[in-house]
Image: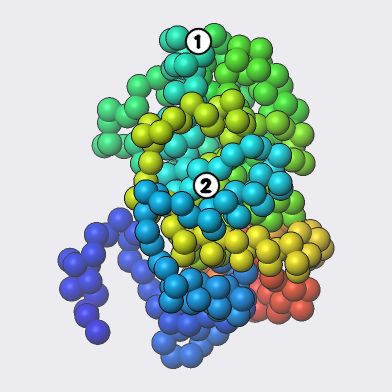
């Protein structure tokens, strides 16, 4: 083992210091080097939707690895068509593009919006985003993520990205120069804050009126997280572009952009691309995740079990908000302290999303008895 000092020199320190080493997982449980168990209420930041070492996912990716890992987008990849077909069916959008992460999906979405605008109505280049938003760390995605700590020292950012400081101001900013507005239905990194549906619907109306696109970033909320395939459905939205990643691959890196045909077709041959995106391994994972959510009736389970999580949280904490298996709550102490305590004393993994704000985004396979265990463990640190 390397000493802490050695590690701090050989790895970039952008994640700060990391205390826990996880070596194995099974279902909703994770284990450290000493074999100690942790109830996983974080799921690798809303990623491992089927939990850990899910037998069907293991089988699918093992089989695919032994058959064909990668061949590039120079060739047809039938697995992309299968995953696209399902995503189209569940979302009501028309076509899919596959990439490798959330930021990459948003990057493609922003490019697509400007490209669409350029083929439609000349000089529409403005990209709008919401206060509290998080869309990722690449330059485009970062430029629509108005968090000073994330943007500091990286300027100049992408031109023509505007983030008004209130929802009211977002509405009044929409004009004929607007190419698109990107929104989350529930702001995950922003503290699991649901964005009011009436605001989103009004925003959609104004965007439509000036032929600007609505991009819904479902990187965190999509693929069952909220108890529906997509959060935009319960918000009553009709997006032109939807971005996905996190839970879609169940732990295998994969991102996707879904769009209406009229918009998708502006990415003509050669206009955008990725080497790894949608490779057979990633697609076998995504296909299995979608099948398991469908076959296991997991959307219904997420709503039912999520309601039990909400009830427990509301009994003990304040400002509980979210949907399905995506919850945030406020505590009086320092959030990082609480998370550390939960990990070290209670054996529960959660994340801090703000000074006094905690997020729980467990695997979608969480069951009612796991919530009892969660409650039992959390009582030990209250
Ligand atoms: C995590 C997240 C991203 C960024 O995804 P990466 O895979 O980390 O690039 C973008 N948007 C939302 C809403 C997210 O939660």
Horizontally, is 242 left or right of 152 in the view? right
Image quadrant in which you'd find residue 238 = top right
Q: Quadrant of the C terminus?
A: bottom right
Name the residue beneath numbered marker 2.
Answer: 256
Q: Is residue 47 visible?
A: no
Corner quadrant of residue 42 = bottom right
Q: How many marks?
A: 2
Q: Position of residue 183 (x, y in %)?
A: 58, 34
Residue 10 to residue 358: above or below: below
Residue 225 is situated, as x and y percent measured from the top left of the image, at 67, 55
State the residue at coordinates (47%, 39%): 106
> On the rendered structure, is 295 left or right of 47?
right
Does residue 118 appear in the picture of this structure?
yes
Q: Residues within 10 Å of mark 2 (few under 14, many from 20)?
A: many
Mark 1 is surrounded, within 10 Å at the Cα level, by few (under 14), some (14 to 19) or many (20 or more) other residues, namely few
User: Is disc 1 placed on a helix, strand or loop?
Assistant: loop
* First-in-chain label (2 vs 1): 1
Q: Is residue 357 left or right of residue 276?
A: right
Say if mark 2 contacts mark 1, CB within 8 Å: no
Q: Is residue 333 left or right of residue 323?
A: left
| Labelled disc at residue 301 | none
Kindly report the distance in space between the C-alpha atoms of the residues bearing marks 2 and 1.
Answer: 26 Å
Q: Which residue is mark 1?
A: 121
Label 1 near ligand 1 (CB < 8 Å): no
SS at badge 2: strand
| 129 versus 308 height, above or below | above
Q: Is mark 2 within 8 Å of ligand 1?
A: no
Q: Name the spot of residue 214 as percent of width and height, x first.
A: 60, 27
For residue 98, above or below residue 22: above
């Amino acid at each position: 083992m390397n000493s802490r000092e050695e590690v701090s020199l050989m790895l970039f320190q952008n994640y700060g210091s990391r205390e826990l080493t996880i070596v194995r997982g099974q279902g909703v449980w994770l284990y450290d080097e000493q074999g100690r168990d942790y109830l996983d209420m974080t799921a690798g930041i809303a990623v491992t939707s089927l939990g850990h070492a899910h037998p069907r996912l293991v089988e699918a990716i093992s089989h695919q690895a032994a058959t064909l890992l990668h061949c590039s987008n120079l060739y047809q990849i039938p697995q992309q068509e299968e995953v696209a077909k399902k995503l189209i069916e569940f979302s009501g959008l028309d076509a899919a593009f596959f990439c490798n992460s959330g930021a990459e999906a948003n990057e493609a979405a922003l490019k697509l919006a400007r490209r669409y605008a350029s083929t439609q109505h000349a000089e529409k280049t403005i990209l709008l985003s919401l206060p509290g938003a998080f869309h990722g760390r690449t330059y485009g995605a970062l430029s629509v993520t108005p968090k000073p700590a994330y943007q500091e020292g990286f300027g100049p950012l992408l031109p023509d990205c505007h983030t008004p400081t209130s929802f009211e101001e977002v509405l009044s900013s929409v004009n004929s120069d607007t190419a698109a507005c990107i929104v989350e239905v529930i702001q995950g990194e922003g503290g699991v804050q649901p964005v009011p549906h009436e605001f989103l619907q009004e925003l959609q109306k104004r965007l439509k009126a000036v032929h600007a696109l609505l991009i819904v970033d479902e990187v965190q909320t999509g693929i069952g997280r909220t108890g529906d395939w997509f959060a935009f459905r319960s918000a009553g939205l009709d997006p032109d572009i939807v971005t996905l990643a996190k839970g879609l691959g169940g732990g295998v890196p994969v991102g996707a952009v879904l769009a209406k045909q009229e918009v998708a077709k502006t990415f003509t041959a050669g206009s955008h691309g990725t080497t790894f995106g949608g490779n057979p391994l990633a697609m076998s994972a995504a296909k299995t995740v979608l099948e398991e959510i469908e076959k296991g009736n997991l959307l219904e389970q997420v709503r039912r079990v999520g309601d039990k999580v909400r009830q427990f949280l509301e009994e003990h904490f304040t400002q509980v908000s979210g949907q399905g298996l995506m919850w945030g709550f406020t505590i009086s102490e320092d959030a990082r302290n609480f998370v550390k305590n939960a990990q070290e004393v209670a054996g529960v993994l959660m994340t801090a999303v703000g000074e006094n704000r905690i997020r729980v985004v467990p695997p979608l396979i969480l069951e009612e008895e796991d919530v009892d265990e969660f409650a039992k463990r959390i009582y030990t640190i209250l």
